[in-house]
Image (cartoon, grey):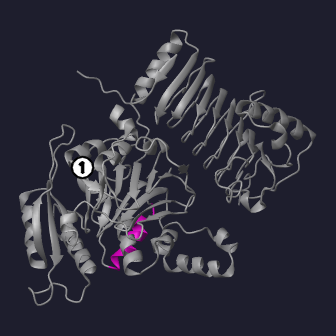
Amino acid sequence: MEINAQGIYYKDLNDIIRKAIRNGEENFILRNVNGQRYIADGISKKISMEVYGVPGQDLGAFMKGPRVVVHGNAQDGVGNTMDVGKIVVEGMAGDVVGYGMRGGRIHIKGDAGYRVGIHMKAYQDKIPVIVIGGKAGDFLGEYMAGGVIILLGMFSQDAAKPIAGIFMGTGMHGGVIYVRGEVDPHQLGFGLIPKELDGEDQKNLKIYLKEYCDDLDIDLRKVLSVPFKKVVPFSHRPYGNMYAY
Amino acid sequence: MKSWQYQKDISGCGLSGIINKNGERITGESIICSIACQHDRGNGLGGGFAAYGIYPDFKDHYALHIMADNLDALHAVEGFLNQTVSVVHQEKIPTRPNKYITDPPILRRYFIEPVKEGDRICRWPGLSDDDYIVRVVMNVNRDIKGAYIFSSGKNMGAFKGVGFPEDIADFYRLDEYSGYIWTAHNRFPTNTPGWWGGAHPFTILDWSIVHNGEISSYGINKRYLEMFGYHCTLLTDTEVVAYLLDLIIRRHGLPVELACKVFAPPFWQEIDRMDKEAKRLFTAIRMVYGSGLLNGPFAILFAYNGGLVGLNDRVKLRPLVAAVKGDTVYMASEESAIRAICPDPEKVWAPKAGEPVIVTMDKGASTTKKQARLSPACAGA
């Protein structure tokens, strides 16, 4: 089903999509999207959706199954608390990508904003993964409780900018952040230091990155040609004693 | 009987700004289209615009925009103006009925100059023209009940009220104005009342500011400003920023970039890693202007006759996106608000926290040219 979203109010657009899904439609192409919020939110079917234009806030929030490809930039709140499925962004993404994400994949080709992957969590076989091809802002993976964030720094529009901002992984108590190349310790949250990858890390990283490179038509060998560092929690309860005087 | 259904509106304020560095004047339709694209960032309790280059016939006079609750208040203001300034021209601010804009105050504008010594008795001799006008505005807003001067710059004006911005724009007939800088605001009041005076932009002289967020340092900022003769009367945190701009940039002479570092200074841990010179500078800024620091989340756009500036708080707790095409620079809360009026920008980026985007007018820019710009996205909507 193809929808020309130009000038359609977000509620009406989402009504059209939901109604079509109820009627069995599984493939959507949305054209001329510009700022419509809540696209694909809470949808628990394995639909496929291609978005042309700039989708609005909270794209794919709470979703459980869909595969969404954005042929352009996305705004804030991509994949908020998403559960299952995949969001591929061929351009840049805004702030708070994958907030509280609990499963699925978010693959961003370019830069991402502040607070990406904060409060991510994992449970048994549900391991959320965010891959950022460009650079990220401050607070990447803040309070992270599980899952994987991979930061490549390769496709940024700002060559001069450091690969990430500051306060990376502040308060994290689960999960892992992989950074391609070096990350300066001053960019990390309190108590964290960059570490070398072990064999298990290398194996997982390759699996995640292969999928990412396939989605975005990127040469995997080139991505893997530079060693990665990882950032992991220094303790299961990093602030366990914070308020214990 | 109609049952009352509670539906939570998830919103934050929305901002949009446009500047043509070459001085070409853009019709109001563009900024209206851009802010309307962010309709759901507000809740109908405030909308407003600032426009620069709109009064070429009176460009050397201060344009006072006044809102008054009733004729008594208006007459009190006029009495005060007659004692303190020379009114060159006065008129109603043109409006048209809009079904969503209810109970507006009386709206008038006056093109004025300060009374010079020897002319009539000068109320405050020895002040510069700008300082004199600030005194006029502060006196009216503080002392005359039910009347406010909400715009006081040269060749610019603020237009604001209670309603969604696109309805406020229709009410004020902003499609009939052309300006080389425009800013717009869609309000979702959180801590303070949604009333006509509390809508954004806030202005003093040609400074105007629109803001998304909340300024939790309001009390400190307000008391600091009082020492320099600024009185906050509009019951909204953002008001302090307008006066801080006037104090720090116009009166104290700090460059715009350093003023932004007063509002959003580097963290001490960042200052620690700077070289000696920068460390000295930013330490001094934080020591001298600690009371000018804006605490809390913010994305702001401020403008003056010479430029447009976008700035975020130090940890980017509110969104801001910028884009460029040719001589025109766009800034907004959401990229879609830019694409609504400029579908193919040359560059789009998200400014870093605490790092201002400063766009100044080109040297030799002429503000007499006009360009019609009706965006394709809005034309189709």
For the C terminus of chain B, which image quadrant?
top left
Spot occupied by residue A161 in the image (x, y as percentages of width and height)? 67, 58
- Give the camera-side residue of B9 and B258: B258
Q: Is residue B218 magenta?
A: yes
* Residue beneath the point at 78% across and 27% down: A125
Residue B167 screen position, x and y as percent: 25, 42
* Nearer to us in this view, A127 or B96: B96
Q: Position of residue B367 (x, y in %)?
A: 31, 63
Q: Main secondary structure of the magenta part?
A: helix
What is the magenta range? B216-228
Q: Residue B344 appears at what percent x and percent y?
A: 49, 43
Q: Find disc 1 in the rendering and name its residue.
A: B174
**As drawn, is A224 to the left or to the right of B259?**
right
Tag 1: amino acid: Leu
Report in which chain the residue with disc 1 lies: B
Q: Secondary structure at mark 1?
A: helix
